[in-house]
Image (tube, rainbow, N blue to C red):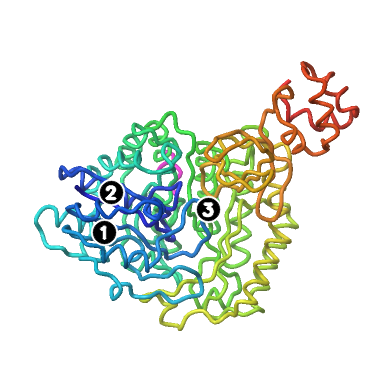
């Protein structure tokens, strides 16, 4: 028996915290299946609830996938800690244990810290600094336990296809999102960002469209309906031409990729992307616009181009070899808005919007340099542009990166918090109101956590919005369609949609702006309500009825 323990990963170009399931997990499962092993799969959150001592003792081989090289806050799961990993590695077992994933670069759990070398704390047989699936395959074939082994895309097809079946063991199944690998390494031709581990290995290769399509087909057969092109440093450059100015995007190649995915999973519900280099857009605006147009027509609404800006002050950009200046970043945001800001479903979310990543505390950063970021965001507000989300983090410091050699972050926590709070209070609410104004419909929202009269949930997607649904009747795990009623600093408020005035509860009705307890009681007392005229009569305010009519099924 082969045992896979998913401690979750978060990297610049790979995400694997539920409801996402990372390629690492699926590839390792594929290796085990291809060698005739029975596969058991558990997430770290499952292990916290139910001990797996028996499975660990009896497994022929154990693979643990874990590690964060990008700090984040997670709602779907809590990543494995070094203490948990150490305790797991010290459990009695007869088989070999391989630890792989982002932890190959070191262990860090939050921003503003220097990564630790985990090897001294672990009793694992191997920490894979290469590809855990390649290490696993070699050992199962009778070869040495060599943690540096890497695989190429020629080896991947069988493992990717056979490993698709492991998704059925995920605790969120069938509501899972499969992270798809398009390429490895960074496509920048002018070096890499000071903090980033993506280009440490110096590896740069693209996966063939045919290989991606075969994996999507296998995942679709297993019931997966949500996909993200996430294992890629720059989706916009996939299949592009390398030039001295950077990778020139290829609209035809992107079109081929998206069509192949659509053909392989014709009943998919979510097709989103992750990373897009803003410098690619600023350097090649025409080709980038064409690529973005292809994506926005072939994806599903609510998609996000995650753009790493980090810092826009010229000195910080220079010192850390960052990607864009303030003006280039503005070009990128404008282009994405122009191409992807439409709403193909009418009152649905926009097709494709920018997501902005800032890192506060890079070498050279001060409270004064942060003013450039404020100026940029203020300009976006003044131009009426939309941004899907703004991530603000402190850097993690890893050995082997230029930042590690420069001595890491120097900015203080107070300065970091002041900038972050300004964004959350002054920028985010405006952006939420632009992206999802009242009346916007968001489908397939998964209810996750109750708080009083509200139950919070999110749809599957790339950086999905957090939605507080006004209802006492919904339970965790239910999937509903909602209509937005308003926005706050970090979340959207909504009610179930469409609402049946003859079946909804008193609390449901009170979630609609303008309907207080008295009007809600009057509506309920006059049931059955079969027409809008009857609803208007119950509301006793024709002007209010016009505003709330969109929330009801009449």
Q: Is residue 318 above or below residue 478?
A: below
Give the percent coordinates (x, y) of residue 347: 68, 34
Q: Residue at x 58, y 80 (%)?
A: 411
Q: Earlier in the sequence, mark 2 or mark 3?
A: 2
Residue at image location 30% in from the left, 37% down from the top: 214
Q: Which residues are magenta?
A: 249-255
Q: In terms of secondary structure, where does tag 3 sit?
A: loop
Q: Position of residue 508 (x, y in %)?
A: 72, 34
| Prevailing secondary structure of the magenta residues | helix
Please tell me whether residue 251 belongs to the stretch shown in magenta. Answer: yes
**Residue marked by disc 1:** 131
- At numbered mark 1, what does the secondary structure look like: helix, strand or loop? loop
- Give the residue number, with chain letter if any, for mark 2: 27
Q: Are marks 2 and 3 in contact (CB under 8 Å)?
A: no
Instruction: Determine whether, in the image, residue 384 is placed left or right of residue 337.
Output: right
Picture disc at residue 75 = 3
State yes or no: residue 456 in magenta. no
Q: Is residue 244 above or below residue 386?
A: below
Q: Residue at x 49, y 58 (%)?
A: 277
């Amino acid at each position: 028996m082969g045992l896979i323990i998913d401690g979750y990963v978060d990297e610049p170009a790979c995400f694997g915290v539920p409801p996402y399931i990372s390629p690492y997990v699926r590839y390792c499962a594929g290796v085990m299946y291809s060698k005739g092993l029975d596969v058991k799969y558990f997430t770290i959150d499952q292990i916290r609830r139910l001990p797996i001592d028996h499975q660990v003792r009896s497994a022929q081989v154990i693979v643990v996938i874990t590690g964060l090289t990008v700090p984040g806050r997670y709602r779907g799961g809590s990543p494995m800690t070094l203490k948990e990993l150490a305790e797991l590695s010290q459990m009695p077992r007869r088989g070999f244990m391989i630890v792989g994933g982002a932890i190959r670069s070191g262990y860090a759990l939050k921003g503003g810290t220097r990564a630790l070398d985990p090897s001294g704390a672990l009793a694992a047989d191997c920490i894979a600094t290469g590809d855990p699936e390649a290490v696993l395959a070699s050992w199962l074939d009778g070869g040495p336990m060599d943690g540096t082994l890497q695989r190429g895309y020629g080896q991947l097809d069988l493992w990717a296809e056979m490993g698709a079946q492991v998704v059925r063991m995920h605790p969120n199944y069938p509501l899972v999102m499969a992270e798809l690998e398009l390429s490895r390494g960074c496509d920048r031709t002018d070096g890499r960002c000071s903090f980033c581990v993506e280009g440490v290995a110096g590896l740069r290769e693209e996966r063939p469209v045919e290989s991606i399509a075969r994996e999507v087909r296998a995942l679709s057969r297993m019931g997966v309906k949500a996909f993200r092109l996430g294992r890629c440093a720059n989706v916009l450059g996939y299949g592009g031409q390398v030039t001295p100015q950077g990778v020139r995007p290829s609209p035809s190649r992107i079109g081929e990729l998206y069509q192949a995915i659509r053909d392989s999973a014709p009943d998919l519900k979510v097709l989103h992307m992750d990373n897009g280099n803003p410098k690619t857009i600023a350097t090649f605006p025409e080709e980038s616009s064409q690529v973005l147009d292809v994506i926005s027509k072939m994806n599903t609404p609510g998609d996000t181009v995650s753009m790493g800006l980090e810092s826009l002050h010229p000195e910080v950009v220079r010192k850390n070899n960052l990607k864009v200046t303030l003006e280039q970043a503005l070009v990128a945001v404008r282009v994405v808005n122009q191409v992807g800001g439409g709403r193909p479903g009418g009152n649905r979310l926009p097709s494709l919007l920018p997501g902005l990543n800032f890192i506060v505390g890079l070498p050279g950063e001060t409270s004064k340099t942060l003013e450039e970021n404020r100026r940029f965001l203020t300009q976006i507000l003044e131009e009426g542009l939309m941004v899907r989300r703004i991530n603000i983090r402190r850097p993690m410091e890893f050995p082997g990166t230029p930042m590690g050699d420069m001595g890491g972050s120097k900015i203080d926590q107070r300065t970091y918090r002041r900038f972050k709070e300004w964004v959350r209070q002054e920028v985010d609410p405006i952006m939420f109101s632009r992206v999802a104004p009242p009346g916007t419909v968001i489908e397939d929202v998964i209810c996750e956590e109750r708080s009083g009269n509200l139950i919070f949930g999110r749809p599957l997607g790339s950086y999905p919005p957090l939605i507080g649904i006004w209802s006492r009747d919904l339970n965790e795990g239910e999937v509903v369609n909602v209509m937005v009623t308003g926005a706050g600093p970090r979340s959207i408020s909504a009610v179930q949609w469409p609402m049946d005035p003859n079946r909804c509860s008193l609390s449901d009705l009170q979630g609609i702006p303008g309907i207080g307890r008295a009007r809600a009681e009057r509506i309920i007392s006059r049931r059955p309500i079969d027409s809008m005229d009857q609803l208007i009569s119950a509301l006793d305010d024709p002007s209010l009825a016009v505003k709330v009519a969109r929330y009801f099924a009449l």
